[in-house]
Image: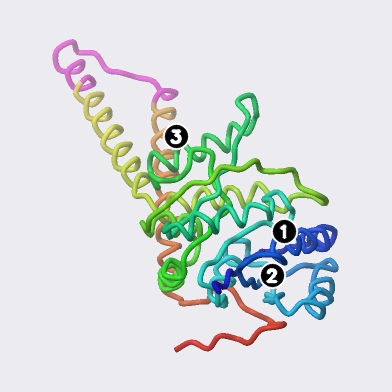
Amino acid sequence: MALISVIIPTYNEEENLPILYGRLQEVTNKSEYDFEFIFIDDGSTDRSSPILKGLSTHDSRIKIIKFSRNFGSHAACLAGLTHSKGDACTFISADLQDPPELIHRLINEWRSGYEVVIGVREWEKDSGRYFQRLYYRLVRKFALKNMPESGTDVFLIDRKVVNAVISMGEKNTSIFGLILWSGFSQKVVYYKKGARYKGASKWTLGKKIKLFIDTFVSFSYFPLRVMSFLGITIAFTGFIYALIVIAARLFYSKTIEGWTSLMVVLLLVSGVQMILLGVLGEYLWRNFDESRRRPPFIVKDFIGMEEKKEK
């Protein structure tokens, strides 16, 4: 009987956890598969931790990985993969936006031979989320060609994919991007993403910006190409302008004056240079961060499971 690991990053979700567990029970109790529920407590400051401990005393399938602090949902997903034992692993959110009932649809596609099954949300034509749509379009065009147009937060992946992702050992990246980049056989399953059941979203603007930068820096050299293009364009424009100034002085005895225009050009070029240095700095920082070999997460405690020793 196949074992399915359900990985659930959790950060201050005390109101949603009992409801989520009840729905997981409904979905899995009469299933032909075995399940383990791996909750990653990503530094919660509410009652999420004691609620999870209480649930684990009644259900041996519940495993808890408690972080020493908040490391982010992608680090939590990586921790779940690292310590999972399933023949396949799937991710769902603790806020019930991704319905647990989707799990069996993903499993069915996996059993038919697909190694990566992607849950893709269905958006209404008149729905907002313009910046989200723009983000996924940019990712598809310049970074990951196989990124679904409406994005994804739900995957079910085979054990061989799990091992491949863990072996990459990357930080400051998108765990879902690594799965898509790995190139295993893929199948898309469409579903309607629900509203958050209770509580406020922890997905802040700062986290969204970091994910945007991480995705492009990790999977695309397009920002560097833009830097080269801007540099060549500005240099060429400056060269043409210099020829105009020289020609005006030699052939028309005319001197181009203007402190204002000079300052505008100086400030414009300096601003572009600072932007280019910032882009380059993003790449250099990530190289430096990788070279320090700090772990992507630190586990404070394991509950209901044993720590997996590195070989």
In space, the residues marked 2 and 3 are separated at their CA atoms by 51 Å
Q: Position of residue 280 (x, y in %)?
A: 39, 53
Of marks 1 and 2, which one's residue comes earlier in the chain? 2
Query: Are discs 1 and 2 less than 8 Å apart at CB?
Result: yes
User: Which numbered marker is on residue 39?
Assistant: 2
User: Which numbered marker is on residue 267?
Assistant: 3
Residue at coordinates 51% horizontally, 76% vertically from top-left?
294
Tell me the mark number nearer the camera, choosing from 2 and 3: 2
Give the residue pinned by disc 1: 94
Identity, as a three-letter code, of the amino acid under mark 3: Leu
> Dot 1 lies on which element?
loop
- Counting labels gives 3
Residue at coordinates 34% horizontally, 40% vertically from top-left?
226
Query: Are discs 2 and 3 less than 8 Å apart at CB?
Result: no
Q: Nearer the viewer, residue 226 or 190?
A: 190
Magenta-tinted stretch: 244-261
Position of 4 compared to 179: left or right?
A: right
In space, the residues marked 1 and 2 are separated at their CA atoms by 9 Å
> Dot 3 lies on which element?
helix
Above or below: residue 231 compared with residue 288:
above
Colour mode of the rendering? rainbow
